[in-house]
Image: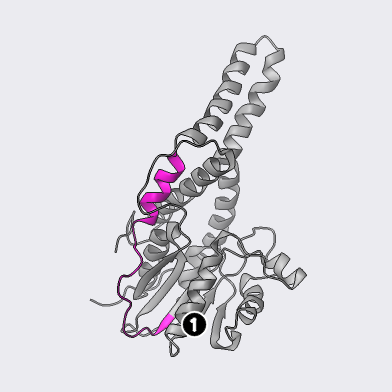
């Protein structure tokens, strides 16, 4: 079967993608669980001192009950567990790998470049895996893809910051090809494909967080890559157990992360960016 033609080829499509990128950032800022709980609380609190006090009490209670509920009922873990279990870590690695791609999204490039020291988020395991795979496959091409996902700050790229980080962990930056324009996963796949132009017969590894792997694999396949998943940065255990705990930040954070990925899967599928609603191995 022939390779699918890469999408987003013309300036009109790129213009639409710019608008969609901005809308996605604004939309998620308004509808993520933390923002919704805050908005409901903000709407209800002033009503407590008016004739609509009953409505105000209802809204305040709704916000408080929902906030406490995500601490007790592990909805976020359930959402993440299904995502992280979709593409397991390969039991047997390919004998030959032509290239390895690491997705950005887990470094604050502004603090890194300002301080000269790595400012990594929770996905630092992407870096560890990428460096280990680079050592395991010394002849493989290495690619890092990441521009800036900040809507109002496009002056510095993650790729620029990762040059510093790679050098600090002993990975020669000159061995790595850097794609520094992409702002999201869709653009990671498209712009990296254009930059690398991999032949159809080549096999590539994709390194990213396990929760992000289904959407990433769908996008990269749709763009024309022959790609193998190498998931890292797991947020859930292999066997999901319900343990009682009161941790507001942890529960709400997992819920936001899971909802964001599932929302991204649905939106990307509706836009035709992925090859399936819930891509599978």
Residue in front for this viewpoint, 99 or 122: 122
In what quadrant of the picture does the N terminus appear?
A: bottom left
**Residue annotated with mark 1:** 142
- Toward which corner of the image does residue 87 lie, by quadrant? bottom left
- Residue reaching furthest right? 114
Q: Is residue 136 visible?
A: yes
Asked whether residue 83 is drawn in magenta, I would say: yes
Secondary element at image label 1: strand
- Residue reaching furthest bottom? 139
Residue 73 lies, with reference to residue 139, above or below; the image says above
Residue 266 lies, with reference to residue 34, above or below; the image says below
Q: Specify whether 260 is left or right of 281.
A: right
Residue in front for this viewpoint, 17 or 268: 268
Return the x and y of residue 57 as percentages of the image width and height. 61, 16
Return the x and y of residue 153 as percentages of the image width and height. 69, 62
Q: Residue at x 47, y 45 (%)?
A: 259
Q: Which residues are magenta?
A: 74-99
Residue in front for this viewpoint, 5 or 197: 197
Badge 1: few (under 14), some or many (20 or more) residues near its Cα, within 10 Å?
many
Return the x and y of residue 13 as percentages of the image width and height. 49, 65
Q: Specify whether 80 is left or right of 248.
A: left
Q: Specify whether 123 is left or right of 221.
A: right
- Toward which corner of the image does residue 133 lie, by quadrant? bottom left
Colour option used: one colour
In what quadrant of the picture does the C terminus appear?
A: bottom left
Q: Specify whether 116 is left or right of 277.
A: right
Residue in front for this viewpoint, 66 or 146: 66
- Residue reaching furthest left? 1
């Amino acid at each position: 079967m022939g390779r699918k033609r890469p999408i987003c080829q013309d300036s009109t499509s790129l213009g639409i993608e710019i608008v969609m990128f901005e809308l996605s950032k604004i939309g998620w800022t308004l509808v993520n669980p933390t923002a919704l709980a805050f908005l409901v609380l903000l709407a209800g609190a002033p009503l407590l001192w008016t004739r609509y006090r009953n409505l105000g009490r209802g809204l305040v209670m709704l916000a408080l009950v929902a906030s406490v509920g995500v601490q007790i009922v592990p909805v976020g873990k359930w959402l993440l567990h299904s995502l992280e279990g979709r593409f397991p870590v390969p039991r047997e690695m390919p004998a030959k790998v032509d290239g390895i791609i690491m997705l950005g999204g887990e470094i604050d490039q502004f603090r890194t470049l300002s301080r000269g020291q790595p400012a990594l988020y929770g996905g630092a395991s992407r870096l560890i895996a990428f460096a280990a795979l680079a050592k395991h496959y010394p002849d493989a091409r290495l690619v890092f893809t990441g521009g800036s996902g900040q809507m109002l700050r496009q002056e510095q790229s993650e790729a620029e910051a990762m040059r510093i980080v790679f050098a600090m962990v002993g990975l020669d930056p000159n061995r790595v090809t850097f794609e520094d324009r992409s702002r999201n996963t869709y653009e990671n796949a498209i712009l990296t494909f254009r930059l690398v132009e991999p032949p159809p017969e080549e096999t590539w590894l994709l390194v990213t967080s396990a929760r992000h792997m289904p959407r990433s694999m769908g996008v990269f396949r749709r763009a024309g890559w022959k790609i193998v998943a190498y998931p890292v940065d797991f947020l859930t255990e292999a066997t999901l157990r319900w343990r009682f705990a009161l941790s507001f930040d942890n529960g709400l954070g997992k819920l936001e992360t899971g909802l964001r990925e599932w929302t991204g899967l649905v939106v990307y599928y509706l836009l035709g960016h992925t090859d399936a609603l819930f891509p599978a191995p």
